[in-house]
């Protein structure tokens, strides 16, 4: 017989709200990974914005930051998959826009 927790998790996994919550947690974890890799200053130059259909979208202030994230893409995906499951993040999409303001390192 399944425990109450297992039954609840299996039913909630099918609900759109649960998927939205998990997507938010993945985005939050991705932003923490950025800070771990490049320090607190990265928060002003790049952010994970959304997770939709397995695609994690980052917004970057410039091409240098975009390229740095591309170099670490596999590592970021691997870390997120270890935490949230193999199907959580399939690929990374990077857009270039001013995140907040340009910061000199």
Image (cartoon, grey):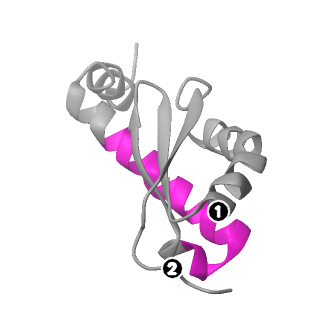
Give yes or no for residue 50 being in the magenta stretch.
no
Q: Is residue 13 above or below residue 57?
A: above
Quarter of the rendering occupied by the N terminus: top left
Residue 93, image x, y percentages:
53, 38
Mark 1 crowdedness (10 Å alpha carbons): few <14, some 14-19, many ≥20: some
Name the outermost residue toward the bottom. Answer: 104
Residue occupying the point 55% across, 32% down: 89
Residue occupying the point 68% across, 86% down: 105
Residue 36, image x, y percentages:
68, 69
Is 13 left or right of 94, judged from the image as shown?
left
Which callout, 1 or 2, points at the residue further toward the start of the chain?
1
In the picture, residue 66 is in which quadrant?
A: bottom right
- Cβ–Cβ below 8 Å for labels 1 and 2? no
Residue occupying the point 69% across, 45% down: 79
Mark 2 crowdedness (10 Å alpha carbons): few <14, some 14-19, many ≥20: few
Give yes or no for residue 33 being in the magenta stretch.
yes
Residue occupying the point 35% across, 32% down: 5
In the picture, residue 87 is in which quadrant?
A: top right
The secondary structure that dominates the magenta segment is: helix
Q: Is residue 50 above or below residue 55?
A: below
Residue 17's tag is none
Span of residues in magenta: 21-42
Residue 24, image x, y percentages:
36, 48
Q: Nearer the viewer, residue 26 or 4?
A: 26
How far apart are labels 1 and 2 at the CA level?
11 Å
Residue 65's tag is 1
Name the outermost residue toward the top. Answer: 1
The residue at which mark 2 appears reads as 102
Is 95 left or right of 91, judged from the image as shown?
left
Q: Secondary structure at mark 1?
A: helix
């Amino acid at each position: 017989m399944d425990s109450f927790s297992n039954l609840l998790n299996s039913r909630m996994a099918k609900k759109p709200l649960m998927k939205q919550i998990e997507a938010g947690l993945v985005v939050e974890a991705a932003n923490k990974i950025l800070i771990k890799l490049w320090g607190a200053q990265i928060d002003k130059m790049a952010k994970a914005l959304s997770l939709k259909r397995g695609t994690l979208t980052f917004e970057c202030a410039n091409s240098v930051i975009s390229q740095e994230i591309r170099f670490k893409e596999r590592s970021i995906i691997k870390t997120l998959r270890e935490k949230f499951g193999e199907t959580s993040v399939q690929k990374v999409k990077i857009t270039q826009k001013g995140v907040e303001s340009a910061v000199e390192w």
